[in-house]
Amino acid sequence: MGAQVAGKRDMPRYYFVVEMPDHTYDDSEGEQLPSDAAAKTYGGRVVRELKERDFESAGAILLVRNEGGQIIQSIPF
């Protein structure tokens, strides 16, 4: 997972990918968060904020992936 820096472990990085029927918005940078639970909470906030901004979300799903690429949660819009 995270890299070792001066004897301390970095927080794991999570990626938040929006998949739509005709397009995928990749998250190449991701976010460092302390746990899967924190990443799931963050993903829920991303979906709420996009909806508030009238993001065209018909059929969209937010995939929350861990550093290993595993989907830890999918959140429909």
Image (cartoon, rainbow, N blue to C red):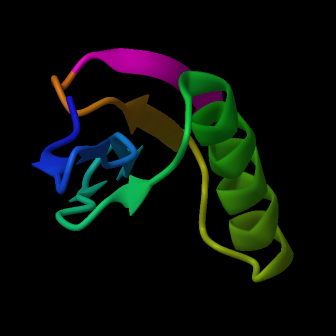
Q: Is residue 19 above or below residue 50?
A: above
Between 61 and 46, the one nearer to me in the picture: 46
The answer to whether any part of residue 7 appears in the image is yes
Relative side of 41 to 62, left or right: right
Magenta stretch in the rendered image: 70-75
- Decide whether residue 71 is among the magenta residues: yes
Residue 57 in the image, given as x and y percentages of width and height: 60, 57
Between 48 and 13, the one nearer to me in the picture: 13
Main structural element of the magenta stretch: helix, strand or loop? Answer: strand
Please tell me which residue is depicted at 25% across the width and 56% down the height of the picture: 23
Please tell me which residue is depicted at 52% across the width and 37% down the height of the picture: 61
Q: Quadrant of the N terminus?
A: top left
Residue 50 position by quadrant: bottom right
Between 77 and 27, the one nearer to me in the picture: 27
Residue 34 position by quadrant: top right
Q: Quadrant of the C terminus?
A: top right
Residue 59 in the image, given as x and y percentages of width and height: 54, 39
Between 14 and 17, the one nearer to me in the picture: 14
Relative side of 9 to 45, left or right: left
- Decide whether residue 64 is among the magenta residues: no
